Image: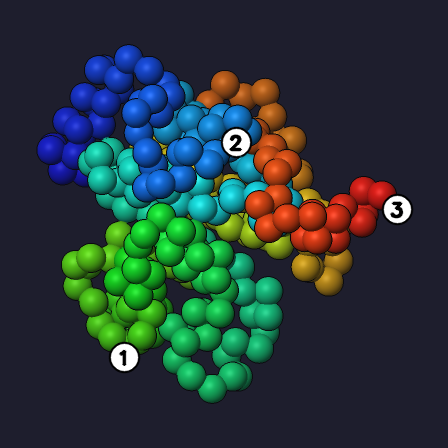
Amino acid sequence: MAKAKLKAKETRLNKQTSETLPDDLLLYGLRARMTNEQEFYANSIYSTKKKIVWCNAMAGTGKTTVATAVAKLLKEEGYYDGLVYVFNPTEEDKMGFRPGSQATKEREYLGPLKDALIEIGDDPSRAIQIELEDEDQPKWVSLAGVEVNNGNAWVTAVSHTFFRGTNKQNKIIIIDEAQNFTKAQLKKILTRCHDTCKVIVIGHDGQIDLKNPKHSGFVHYINHFLGEEQSELCILTKNFRGWLSQHADSIDEAS
């Protein structure tokens, strides 16, 4: 890590008088609409005391949007180098046989991230870069498949399948749809993150898409970190999509 980045991190740790977002911060237009639960969630991510934040919430509660907004804020303030967005291709076995480049196939899994970026006024086609494993292709490409040079792209989208052997430092890591990760997959990611990272694990234990829901490691890992001082669990209950979405999502709770 460069000395300047170390200095910026030390300055934040030494001079930040509050572990919460400044009262006058608009957070890219989200602040005025945020619930108390979302405010707690955002403050947990912003806090220097929390290295990992868990969010177990239904669809439509803004969990990815709030996380992306605070990640952008922390990046712009110079405390982290950027955001690594980790997704799980649940149809992984088919990815290698479908036509198109790796970037084209992986683009299908970036819907929540793209929606979150649009919500905070960012252009996904410029903000996101995809890391490629193939040696005969550019290492970094935009969503359109064009080679990029880390210009405006501050988000790296990567499948967990390419996480083995990596070493993440001074990054914000969002693990999205984490209910679809097995315990081994989550372990693979989390054990490659240094303490200089901020990790946000997002999911909903009521929407597991794995063939066997018991294989999900999401709740197992939440319980493993529960009670740890540097970990925070956040619950969001307001579905901003409205009654239809919320009532549909509550079927398991009612049955």
- From the viewer's perspective, is 253 left or right of 121? right
- From the viewer's perspective, is 200 left or right of 37? left
Q: Quadrant of residue 220?
A: top right
Find the residue positioned furthest to the bottom. Answer: 99
Q: Tag 3 or tag 1, which sits nearer the N-term?
A: 1
Single out the mark in the foreground, 2 or 3: 2
Scheme by which the image is coloured: rainbow
Secondary structure under badge 1?
Answer: loop
Residue type at tag 3: Ser
Single out the mark in the foreground, 1 or 2: 2
Q: Which residue is mark 3?
A: 255
Nearer to us in this view, 236 or 220: 236
Q: Give how far across and how far down residue 167 sits, in percent.
A: 34, 47
Q: Quadrant of residue 133?
A: bottom left
Which residue is painted at 48% across and 47% down in the image? Answer: 64
Q: What's the CA distance linking mark 2 and mark 3?
A: 28 Å
Residue 171 is at least partly visible in this image: no
Q: Give how far across and how far down residue 206 sits, in percent.
A: 71, 47
Asked if the residues shown at circle 1 and circle 3 are in contact, with their CB atoms under 8 angstroms apart, the answer is no
Q: Which residue is mark 2?
A: 35
